[in-house]
Amino acid sequence: MHGSRFAEAAFGSGFGSGRGGRGRGGRGRGPEAAPPVDRTEVAGWFAGRLPDGWFTGPVELTIDRDEITVVGTLAEPDAGAGDAGAASVGRVERFREETRGERMAIADAAQERYGRSVAWGAACGTTRRLFTHSSVPVMTRLRQPERLVLDTLVDAGVARSRSEALAWAVRLVGRNADDWLSELRAAMAAVEEVRGRGPGSDS
């Protein structure tokens, strides 16, 4: 049986129960946003749905409003006299090719159930590869001082456009504020758990 470890994307852990949490159009969600999901329910579903022989241990699940990313660890091959790194790359590529049909079926079922696309990846030794990953546009309004920050990054050659500069800034915040973001996600998850036990919930 596979367990799960969650590595939530920024602002992605505010998901309550799929039946007892906030519905579509909740605060901070557009009218077409996928409904909230119960993280433990998602973990349990994938634990039961994934074939037992695929991975050596718990899968890593990253969940946001648009996508579920599933990354599992593969057994390291015995490279013998060969290069261990190249052997790991080969093992990941083999897994990708041999499991494509099953992964597509699981992804279709998960998208029907949770309203999110599924991206796949695998790790083996020092190799980590994402096979599929969505690039989702995010619309925002920025005031002039904020636009000037992006333009400075563009003018300095750090980014080629404002959108690329914004993505760079988000990645930078994610790397340097990881502890704070982790605390924020934990607090949000606790709030969702309490809300799910309140009046009107199915529990």
Image: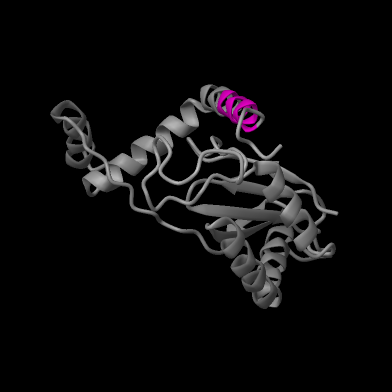
Give the extent of the magenta segment.
Answer: 187-196
Q: Say which residue appears at 22% left-offset and 48% top-offset.
A: 161
Any part of residue 124 in sight: no
Find residue 195 and report its horizontal and vertical position in percent: 60, 28
**Up-down relation of residue 125 to residue 77 (above or below):** above
Left-right relation of 151 to 201 = left
Q: Say which residue appears at 50% left-offset and 59% top-offset.
A: 133
**Up-down relation of residue 17 to residue 79 (above or below):** above
Any part of residue 64 in sight: yes
Residue 51, image quadrant: bottom right
Left-right relation of 53 to 66 = right
Q: Say which residue appears at 71% left-offset and 69% top-offset.
A: 95
137 or 97, which lies in front? 137
Residue farthest to the front, as pictured: 200
Residue 203, image quadrant: top right
Left-right relation of 168 to 174 = left
Rendered image coloring scheme: one colour
Secondary structure mostly seen in the magenta stretch: helix
Find residue 183 and report its horizontal and vertical position in percent: 57, 22
User: Total label count?
Assistant: 0
Left-right relation of 144 to 32 = left
Q: Say which residue appears at 67% left-offset and 40% top-offset.
A: 202
Residue 195 lies in the magenta stretch: yes
Find residue 1 and report its horizontal and vertical position in percent: 86, 54
**Up-down relation of residue 47 to residue 173 (above or below):** below
Residue 145 lies in the magenta stretch: no
